Image (spheres, coloured by chain):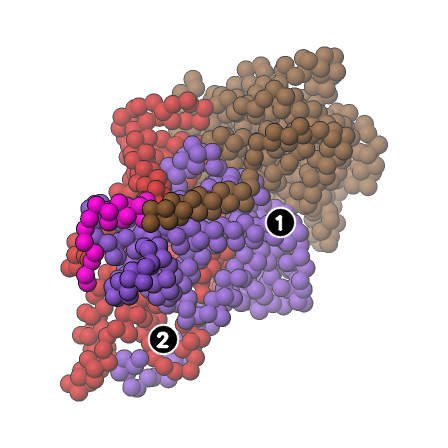
Chain colours: A red, B purple, C brown
């Protein structure tokens, strides 16, 4: 596509047009990254006038803290427990709704509506479903003659319970990406395959999956990023209980920075979180064949 | 579009339908409990009489009217400003060739990789420095620049034929007029997509408004729900909390049920960058 | 074209300004009327927001030059956070109700100011005012000998019990359990199971979620400790978690769940207990007297209140919120805040607050008012909280109180969920607490 000639006037114009966006992006995305980086090397508590430089001490304290590793472990565990199931489920749902039949619209709506609800609302509902003894889950178990589980009370069950809720929400979201990807696969390929005798599961393995490659990569990145920064549900369901079995990284940052007012620690933790997110982004680049085109 | 599975097992169909209904259970339960009399036992389908008392109680106990107003202001004002910043930036990146392009892309890209959600700590400090804590503007400010919006609109703008803008120039239009009369109208779909995603995001945003606001004057719906659910102004906890949950999620969910295709397509295009 | 760009930037600016205008929030009022903002938490059921609003309106009626703007900021945990956030945001409220246990943090970080000067300025009246507060509550206003807060909505933990259930199982409804042994005995009789073995009603209920466990535990610790020793030193610099008696107290909790099976296992939410009690799902609950009004309004059965059963001695934790005045506001505002506080803590008003909520009035003379006498006549259950005060001691109060609560709560939870033994839990709690308090030694 032709572009206008690069001139001084064009440069100025372009920069002027970009200025408003840049002001906000620099102030609230780029600068904060550096601020966190700086504060991560300081001590800065409520009442102190200026932060005090202490080098790597925050990081040393964190890496030596059992609770920190627990939090990291929880975050990783939660991601694993949600990303893979929600992707599998999302793909399954997508293949389910990828046809023209009566009621498909209903299904699509039914799977997708959790996406437009606030996480806080979803967490409230599920908190009652999971409530000990009187919640829907335990009532259901009792009707079946089993013991009520009180899932939110025990560290073995609290993460899977929350993961289950999140997969329920997220599957519909991922489903539509897969749907779009599926619809980009030409029907002719399946025709050709059928002539060769390959249908159903074989067709899926040989045609669908490989051609969904880019979509899979893309969806996995979204799923991973979303699951790592999830925090609303912790605030309302457990606040990290039992004994920090459900505390995840962003909640920990919130706790340190805003409940205990240790902005320096919160900054150090933010830096760690940034490193993790960068790593995820790098993963996508390494795996993807595409380069970023500026034109 | 058919994927070629001519024989569609009735089993899949029935199974699928059942799954769809299961997916709806939490919603059904929430609405049912919100609109029937409170009781000590929970059941999926309501067993007590229908009533509006729960909603009335919650609406009076908590200033949800105020919270609605605040949320609407935040959502609308944010998108309005984004509309402007994103349009200008997208035009520059889609159409103009200029020095420093790569740098801009990098900066925009950083926000794609590192969303504002994880920067609550330093961003709050920035608000404090600007004296904007506990204001609606403070809630919105970090989002006025939207990397996602810029990319979305840029993709769209690039499909607008250069000939159109050249014609407009010949007619005597300046740059802003070109943007306004040529590019914007051709990109309605993208703007709509962006709107739905932005509105959804900000309507449902929680942690950031929680941190930023102190007073009910500036609280948003999600924060109001959380404070209510965690406090004990409610005796029959779940009936009231369900009523509150209904109050804050109803608009988007109802809008979604009506405009399904648009919503879904918006989110899809939001991903294909 | 450049002009158009400038125009655009201007429009952007105007839009921004307009949004600032619509943004609301705290604005500096330069008018003659002073507007005081105050943050307050709600931790009990009932329309407390309306009551606080009424209090403010009443004050404004007498003081037309001042408007008081109360801001509801969630439960105690949320309020502590909100106050710190507001201060960090350079936007502090003029005064606030915060936990009495936060006073060390409030003082050491310079968030609140000492009130001795105001008291002294009131002369003899000031002295009488302070001396009228019950020692059990006034105790936790002092930091290094200075008074930092004024008691307002104070509570103590009492036992609510279902008299109908007592009668049902043959227990005397007027004789609630008074010792740990009796508690186990009664709870066992009161726990009802259906044919399949599922529990229809538990004997006793305790809250174990983050933020609430430590309050209940203070009670048990006080009931079992040597000489009624508390969980911390008076100067707030040391925590005494790891003692044999405390380990025993925690073990008792675990036994109630695991050995005697009279208590719901796992983590029960503070906010769920009253609902469970009212629903007949638990016969006795340890909860705040602040819920008395709420429970009495909604109970469909006869209920009673009682002292917490003791072991070596009787003991109960006090809790609740005091008024603090912010540092960083002008002396005029501080003085105005002080006037409001005195207004809100007059004997009649505290008596009324007691009646409306169930919180205990922290002033001696409140109990001499006709209001209170009438109230006790029609609601004898309310007397119990007052009568328990002599046995009550402050809940866990140290420097960095929020962190300490979290440490104690997390470790109690680890024992409750079987992750650690009672002994290990207390040992871990002690180690973590010592680490945090190291810098204050």
Q: Chain of mark 2?
A: A
Residue under the image location 49 percent in, 42 percent down: C17
Residue B199: mark: none
Magenta stretch contains residue A2: yes
| Residue A171 in the figure: left or right of residue A220 | right
Residue C200's spot in the image, x, y percent?
A: 60, 57
The answer for how far apart the CA atoms under marks 1 and 2 are is: 41 Å
Residue under the image location 56 percent in, 52 percent down: B69
Q: Quadrant of residue B175?
A: bottom left
* Element under disc 1: loop
Residue C387 versus residue A263: which sits nearer the camera?
A263
Residue under the image location 26 percent in, 83 percent down: B4
Please say if C66 is above or below B45: above
Mark 1 on the same chain as mark 2? no
Instruction: Say few, some or many: other residues with alpha carbon within 10 Å of mark 1 (under 14 / 14 to 19 / 20 or more).
Output: some
| Residue B196 in the figure: left or right of residue A66 | right
* Element under disc 2: helix
Residue C322 versus residue C159: which sits nearer the camera?
C322
Instruction: Say few, some or many: other residues with alpha carbon within 10 Å of mark 2 (under 14 / 14 to 19 / 20 or more).
Output: many
Identify the magenta region.
A1-19
Residue C224 versus residue B238: which sits nearer the camera?
B238
Residue B52's spot in the image, x, y percent?
A: 67, 62
Residue under the image location 38 percent in, 56 percent down: A163
Report whether residue C416 is seen.
no
Magenta stretch contains residue B19: no
Residue B62: mark: 1
| Residue C217 in the figure: left or right of residue A189 | right
Q: Chain of mark 1?
A: B
Q: Give the quadrant of the C terminus of chain C.
A: top left
Residue A97: mark: 2
- Name the chief secondary structure element in magenta: helix
């Amino acid at each position: 596509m032709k572009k206008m000639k690069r001139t001084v006037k064009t440069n100025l114009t372009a920069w002027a047009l970009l200025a408003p966006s840049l002001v906000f992006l620099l102030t609230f995305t780029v600068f904060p990254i550096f601020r966190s980086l700086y504060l991560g090397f300081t001590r800065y508590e409520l009442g102190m006038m200026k932060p005090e430089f202490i080098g790597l001490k925050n990081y040393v304290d964190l890496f030596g803290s059992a609770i920190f590793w627990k939090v990291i472990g929880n975050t990783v565990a939660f991601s694993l427990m949600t990303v893979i199931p929600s992707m599998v489920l999302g793909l399954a749902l997508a293949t389910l709704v990828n046809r023209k039949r009566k009621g498909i619209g209903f299904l699509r709506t039914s799977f997708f509506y959790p996406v437009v609800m606030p996480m806080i609302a979803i967490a409230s509902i599920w908190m009652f479903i999971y409530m000990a003894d009187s919640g829907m889950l335990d009532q259901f178990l009792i009707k079946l003659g089993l013991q009520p589980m009180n899932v939110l009370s025990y560290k073995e069950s609290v993460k899977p319970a929350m993961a289950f809720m999140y997969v329920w929400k997220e599957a519909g979201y991922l489903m539509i990406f897969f749907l779009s990807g599926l619809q980009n696969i030409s029907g002719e390929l399946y025709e050709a395959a059928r002539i060769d005798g390959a249908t159903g599961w074989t067709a899926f393995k040989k045609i669908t999956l490989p051609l969904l490659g880019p979509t899979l990569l893309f969806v996995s990145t979204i799923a991973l990023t979303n699951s790592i920064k999830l925090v609303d549900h912790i605030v309302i369901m457990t606040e990290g209980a039992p004994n920090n079995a459900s505390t995840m990284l962003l909640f920990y940052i919130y706790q340190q920075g805003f409940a205990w007012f240790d902005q320096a620690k919160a900054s150090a933790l933010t830096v760690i979180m940034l490193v993790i997110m960068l790593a995820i982004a790098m993963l996508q680049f390494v795996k993807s064949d595409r380069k970023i085109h500026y034109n | 579009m058919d994927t070629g599975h001519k024989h569609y097992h009735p089993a899949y169909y029935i199974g699928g339908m059942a799954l769809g209904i299961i997916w709806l259970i939490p919603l059904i339960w929430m609405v049912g409990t919100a609109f029937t009399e409170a009781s000590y036992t929970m059941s999926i389908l309501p067993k007590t009489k229908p009533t509006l008392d729960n909603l009335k109680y919650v609406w009076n106990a908590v200033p949800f009217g105020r919270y609605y107003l605040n949320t609407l202001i935040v959502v609308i004002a944010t998108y309005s400003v984004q509309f402007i910043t994103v349009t200008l930036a997208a035009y520059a990146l889609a159409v103009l060739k200029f020095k420093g392009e790569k740098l801009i892309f990098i900066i925009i890209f950083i926000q794609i990789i590192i969303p504002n959600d994880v920067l609550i700590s330093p961003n709050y400090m920035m608000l404090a420095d600007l004296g904007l804590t506990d204001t609606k503007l403070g809630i919105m400010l970090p989002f006025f620049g939207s990397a996602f919006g810029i990319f979305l609109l840029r993709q769209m703008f690039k499909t607008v034929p250069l000939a159109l803008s050249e014609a407009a120039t010949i007619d005597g239009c300046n740059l802003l007029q070109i943007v306004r009369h040529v590019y914007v109208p051709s990109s309605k779909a993208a703007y709509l997509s962006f709107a739905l995603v932005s509105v959804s995001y900000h309507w449902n945003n929680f942690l950031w408004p929680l941190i930023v606001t102190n007073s009910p004057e500036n609280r948003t719906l999600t924060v109001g729900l959380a404070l209510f659910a965690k406090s004990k102004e409610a005796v029959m906890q779940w009936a009231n909390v369900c009523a509150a949950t209904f109050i804050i999620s109803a608009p988007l969910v109802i809008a979604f049920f009506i405009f399904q295709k648009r919503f879904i397509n918006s989110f899809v295009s939001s991903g294909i960058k | 074209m450049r002009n158009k760009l400038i125009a655009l930037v201007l429009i952007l600016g105007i839009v921004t300004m307009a949004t600032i205008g619509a943004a609301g929030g705290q604005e500096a009022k330069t008018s003659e009327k002073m507007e005081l903002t105050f943050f307050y938490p709600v931790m009990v059921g009932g329309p407390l927001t309306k009551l606080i609003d009424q209090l403010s309106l009443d004050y404004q009626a007498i003081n037309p030059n001042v408007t008081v703007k109360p801001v509801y900021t969630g439960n105690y945990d949320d309020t502590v956070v909100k106050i710190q956030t507001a201060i960090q945001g350079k936007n502090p409220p003029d005064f606030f109700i915060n936990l009495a246990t936060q006073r060390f943090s409030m003082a050491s970080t310079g968030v609140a100011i000492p009130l001795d000067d105001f008291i002294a300025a009131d002369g003899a009246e000031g002295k009488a005012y302070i001396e009228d507060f019950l020692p059990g509550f006034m105790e936790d206003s002092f930091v290094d000998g200075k008074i930092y807060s004024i008691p307002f909505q104070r509570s103590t933990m009492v036992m609510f019990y279902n008299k109908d259930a007592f009668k049902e199982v043959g227990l005397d409804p007027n004789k609630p359990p008074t010792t740990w042994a009796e508690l186990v005995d009664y709870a066992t009789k009161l726990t009802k199971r259906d044919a399949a073995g599922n529990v229809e009603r538990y004997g006793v209920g305790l809250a174990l979620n983050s933020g609430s466990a430590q309050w209940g535990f203070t009670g048990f610790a006080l009931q079992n400790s040597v000489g009624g020793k508390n969980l911390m030193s008076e100067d707030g610099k040391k925590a005494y978690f790891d003692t044999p008696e405390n380990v025993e107290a925690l073990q008792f909790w675990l036994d109630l769940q695991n050995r005697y099976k009279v208590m719901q296992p796992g983590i029960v939410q503070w906010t769920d207990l009253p609902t469970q009690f009212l629903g007949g799902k638990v016969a006795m609950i340890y909860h705040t007297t602040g819920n008395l009004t709420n429970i009495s309004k909604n109970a469909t059965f006869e209920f009673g209140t009682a002292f917490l059963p003791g072991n070596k001695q009787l003991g109960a934790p006090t809790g609740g919120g005091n008024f603090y005045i912010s540092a960083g506001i002008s002396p005029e505002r501080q003085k105005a805040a002080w006037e409001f506080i005195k207004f809100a803590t007059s004997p009649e008003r505290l008596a009324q607050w007691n009646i409306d909520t169930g919180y205990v009035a922290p002033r001696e003379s409140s109990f001499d008012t006709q209001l209170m006498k009438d109230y006790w006549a029609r609601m004898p259950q309310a007397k119990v909280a007052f009568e328990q005060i002599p046995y009550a001691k402050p809940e866990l109060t140290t420097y960095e109180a929020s962190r300490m609560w979290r440490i104690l709560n997390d470790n109690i939870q680890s024992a409750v969920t079987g992750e650690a033994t009672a002994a290990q839990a207390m040992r871990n709690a002690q180690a973590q607490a010592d680490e945090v308090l190291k810098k204050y030694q």
